[in-house]
Amino acid sequence: MDSTVKTLPIRPPQADNDSSTSHRPTREEAEAAVRTLILWAGDDPSREGLVETPRRVVKAYEQLFEGYNKDAAHALERVFEDIGGYDDLVVVRDIPFFSHCEHHMVPFFGKAHVGYYSSSGVVGLSKLARVIDVFARRLQTQETMSAEIVRAIEETLKPRGVALMLEAEHLCMTMRGVQKPGASTVTTQFTGVFQDNRTEQMKFLTMLRRHSSP
């Protein structure tokens, strides 16, 4: 299995709901665009099997890209300060996600692993999964998605450090282009104590390897 490992700096903050366009097409315009694509592909959008497809595609897109309408900070706003003196590493592993490549609008999917050192409290564990979904359900690159997830956790929880690993298979490599099924892309992002101390990085990565060992 091919694997690419990348560690990227956090990009400058951008508004979660920022849009470069002032006009959002209507549902009718979106459905018309789907019919145009069907025609371009060489099929007849008026035939029985495709006549409802534009409506279904637009409805599906509302769910697949619902991250544009969600705020990651909202998912992390409730912090539990009574943690019984616990101040060690918190790790949530194997969080499944799926997203769409912003270059080809083809899916990529995999698992996220996130760890952090609390500074004043912990967040509900399901909330970390929600943050990952907020950014996954947008047109993305895996690299940008990694930086956005970590930045959201940093800005909201103010932890002593965040560690993130995303492992994903990209169908733009499997179905088109080089057509290499099974190739995986791995991205990592470290801040705070993880960035400053390689021992902490290894602690996080070792916990993931132990989990995946037979």
Image (cartoon, rainbow, N blue to C red):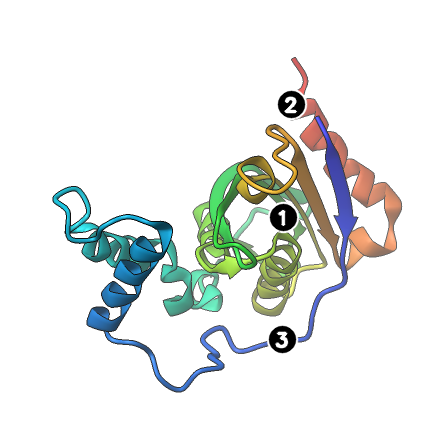
Q: Residue at x 20, y 70 (%)?
A: 28
Q: Position of residue 33 (x, y in %)?
A: 30, 65
Q: Earlier in the sequence, mark 1 or mark 3?
A: 3
Amino acid type at image mark 2 = Ser
**Residue denoted by label 3:** 13
139 relative to 204 in the view: left or right: left
Q: Position of residue 136 (x, y in %)?
A: 49, 54
Viewer-side residue, 100 vs 145: 100
Viewer-side residue, 87 vs 199: 199
Disc sitting over residue 85 in the figure: 1
Q: Earlier in the sequence, mark 3 or mark 2?
A: 3
> Which residue reaches farthest top?
214
Task: Give the CA separation, mark 1 to mark 3.
Answer: 32 Å
Circle 1 residues within 10 Å: few <14, some 14–19, many ≥20: few
Q: Quadrant of the C terminus?
A: top right
Q: Position of residue 172 (x, y in %)?
A: 56, 44
Q: Position of residue 82 (x, y in %)?
A: 52, 53
Amino acid type at image mark 3 = Pro
Viewer-side residue, 182 vs 71: 182
Circle 3 residues within 10 Å: few <14, some 14–19, many ≥20: few
Q: Residue at x 79, y 51 (%)?
A: 194
Q: Secondary structure at mark 2?
A: helix
Q: Secondary structure at mark 3?
A: loop
Q: In the image, is residue 157 above or below residue 123?
A: below
Task: Report the mark closest to the observer, 2 or 1.
Answer: 2
> Which residue reaches farthest left?
48
Residue 167 visible in rendering? yes
131 relative to 168 in the view: left or right: left
**Residue denoted by label 2:** 212
Q: Secondary structure at mark 1?
A: loop
